[in-house]
Image (cartoon, rainbow, N blue to C red):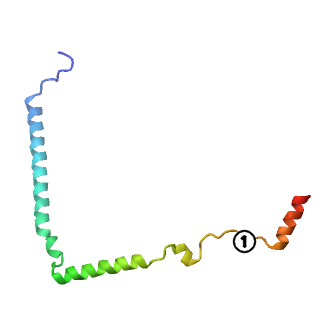
């Protein structure tokens, strides 16, 4: 027997493999058919509202209100809340004099 060559299949093993292939292919076909039927009966497109001129106008008005709300927001929302980091407070005259005295020594 040569290396790499497959052993000869018996008739029984060959028939079993063919049967498994048929069962697998049939199972896949059944699943595809069930999914297609479910998709056709689900009617997802029929659940959507009708597209009328009034609905289009309402949608455009809602978009306009959203744009106005976005423009009305402050430039720095943290500043509006009063939580922005602040610079260190300026030194008082007493502190400045004490610092100068320490520097002179």
Q: Residue at x 16, y 82 (%)?
A: 53
Q: Residue furthest right?
A: 105
Residue closer to the observer: 100 or 17: 100
Q: Residue at x 64, y 70 (%)?
A: 86
Q: Position of residue 55 (x, y in %)?
A: 20, 81
Q: Residue furthest top?
A: 1
Quarter in which the C terminus is drawn:
bottom right
Residue closer to the observer: 93 or 55: 93
Q: Is residue 21 above or below residue 31?
A: above
Residue assigned mark 1: 89
Q: Residue at x 11, y 60 (%)?
A: 36
Residue 15 left/right relative to 85: left
Residue 48 left/right relative to 102: left
Q: Is residue 79 above or below residue 15?
A: below
Q: Quadrant of residue 42?
A: bottom left
The number of numbered discs placed on residues in the rendered structure image is: 1
Residue 59 left/right relative to 32: right
Quarter in which the N terminus is drawn:
top left
Q: Position of residue 80 (x, y in %)?
A: 54, 78
Q: Is residue 53 above or below residue 21?
A: below
Q: Position of residue 76 (x, y in %)?
A: 51, 72
Q: Quadrant of residue 82?
A: bottom right
Residue 3 left/right relative to 74: left
Q: Residue at x 12, y 55 (%)?
A: 32
Q: Position of residue 89 (x, y in %)?
A: 72, 71
Residue closer to the observer: 75 or 9: 75
Q: Classify mark 1: helix, strand or loop.
A: loop
Label 1 Cα crowd, 10 Å radius (few <14 / some 14-19 / many 20+): few
């Amino acid at each position: 027997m040569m290396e790499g060559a497959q052993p000869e299949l018996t008739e029984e093993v060959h028939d079993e493999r063919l049967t498994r292939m048929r069962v697998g292919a049939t199972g896949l076909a059944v699943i595809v058919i069930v999914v297609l039927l479910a998709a056709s009966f689900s009617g997802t497109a029929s659940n959507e509202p009708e597209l009328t001129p009034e609905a289009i106008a309402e949608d455009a008005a809602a978009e306009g209100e959203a744009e106005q709300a976005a423009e009305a927001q402050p430039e720095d929302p943290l500043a509006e809340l009063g939580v922005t980091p602040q610079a260190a407070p300026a030194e008082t005259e007493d502190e400045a004099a004490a610092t100068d005295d320490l520097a002179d020594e």
